[in-house]
Image (cartoon, helix red, strand yellow):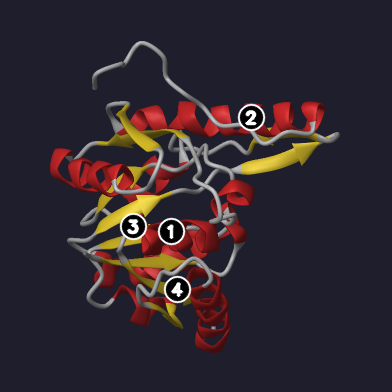
Amino acid sequence: MGRIAILGGTGPEGIGLGLRFALAGEEVVVGSRAADRAEAAATDMRAKLAGVGCSTSVTGADNASAIDGADIVAVAFPYSGVGDLLPGLAPKLAGKIVLDVINPLIRVKKVFVLEPVAEGSVAEKIQALLPESFVVGAFKNESAEELVEIGHPAEGDVVVCGDHADAKAVVMELIARVKNYRAVDAGALANARFTEGITAMLLNINRRYKAVTSIRILGLDGH
């Protein structure tokens, strides 16, 4: 069991991932700008986990404190917070695995599109802001709506991108412990720009069909 901090963990994606990580036996620390808001979210998460018989530790803290002792630090706040929050946390994140789950989404005439990112993707931007951290992009195509419904397993393939092989391997091992998820190594961090685009497409499909979709990579049987 490891310890995972989720910065911006009070939003739907952060809560959903925290619940799934806790079910996989990982200690979770919910981070927020305000410690009381983080602890309130953690209290709700503990109650939800208790309902399915899970007693894994879930606590709350301010973002900076949440990082202390974490094996993986996930960033799950809106894209607008990347440039505001991460530079100030760079010293504490040095040497850490940073799991980026952020998509730069905006809506234009009721259609989801990607906000342009000069570096190519949010993952690449975060790596540029945190040169001493090991950034891995993953969980970008997973629905927060599905993640929070812990009464049934989420399913699909989690596409993983990163330039640091050891860090990517750690994240892929974590994914393998989440029931019904399979990790797919998509290569370099630069490929995160494509996974972010897939999320926009999935959301537009969801809106059209009133569905919740995920992805499965075919042809990888036995891997």
Going 84% across and 35% down the picture, which residue do you hit? 110
Residue 24: give its label.
3
Element marked by disc 2: helix
User: Marks 3 and 4: in contact by CB < 8 Å?
Assistant: no
- What residue sits right under mark 2 in the picture? 202
Say which label, 4 or 1, has the lower sequence index: 4
Say which label, 1 or 2, has the lower sequence index: 1
The Cα atoms of the two marked residues, 3 and 1, are separated by 19 Å
> Does residue 156 appear left or right of residue 214 in this picture?
left
Q: Amino acid at mark 3?
A: Ala
Q: Nearer the viewer, mark 4 or mark 1?
A: 4
Say which label, 2 or 4, has the lower sequence index: 4
User: Marks 3 and 2: in contact by CB < 8 Å?
Assistant: no
> Does residue 172 appear left or right of residue 190 in this picture?
left
Going 55% across and 71% down the picture, which residue do you hit? 48
Say which label, 2 or 3, has the lower sequence index: 3
The Cα atoms of the two marked residues, 2 and 4, are separated by 27 Å
Disc 2: CA contacts within 10 A as few (<14), some (14-19) or many (>=20): many
Q: Amino acid at mark 2?
A: Leu
Q: Nearer the viewer, mark 3 or mark 1?
A: 3
Who is closer to the viewer here, 26 or 34?
26
- The number of numbered badges drawn on the structure is 4
Judge whether 193 appears above or below 97 on screen: above
- What residue sits right under mark 1 in the picture? 75
- What residue sits right under mark 4 in the picture? 30
